[in-house]
Amino acid sequence: MYEDKTLACKDCGQDFVFTAGEQEFYASRGFENEPQRCKSCRDARKTAGRGAREMHMAVCAQCGQEAKVPFKPREDRPVYCSECFAQMKEETAAI
């Protein structure tokens, strides 16, 4: 079976643990190579290529407060602030 491995990040040089669960996940997806970067360096590389997101102002359909959203709101679809969206998500998960 799989055992946790300690690997060195090729970007920052810090040691990170490649857990048995992660190894199993990689194998299930057909990945043959071990990760070469720690999670924070992988995340930094992902966001570096994207650039800044354009945010749009909208009014929350539930509480009426202003909300910034990463998409252009449409008149035919409700938009929720992050608090109301999280609350709705919790209620949906409980059902």
Image (tube, rainbow, N blue to C red):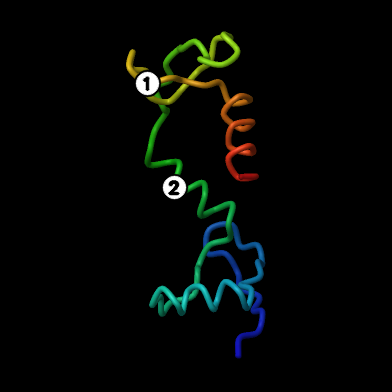
Residue 74 x/y as whole percent: 33, 17
- In this figure, which residue is indicated by the disc labeled 1? 77
Kind of residue at disc 1: Arg
Kind of residue at disc 2: Lys
Answer above or below: position of 88 versus 37.
above
Closer to us: mark 1 or mark 2? 1
- Residue depicted at x 45% and y 42%: 47
- In this figure, which residue is indicated by the disc labeled 2? 46
Q: Quadrant of residue 49?
A: top left
The one of 74 and 62 positioned closer to us in this rendering:
62
- Residue depicted at x 51% and y 46%: 44
Which type of secondary structure does the marked residue at label 1 adopt?
Answer: loop
Q: Is the C terminus in the top left, top right, bottom left or bottom right quadrant?
A: top right
- Residue depicted at x 66% and y 75%: 6
Answer above or below: position of 10 versus 23.
above
> How crowded is the residue under tag 1: few (<14 C-alpha within 10 Å), some, or many (20+)?
few
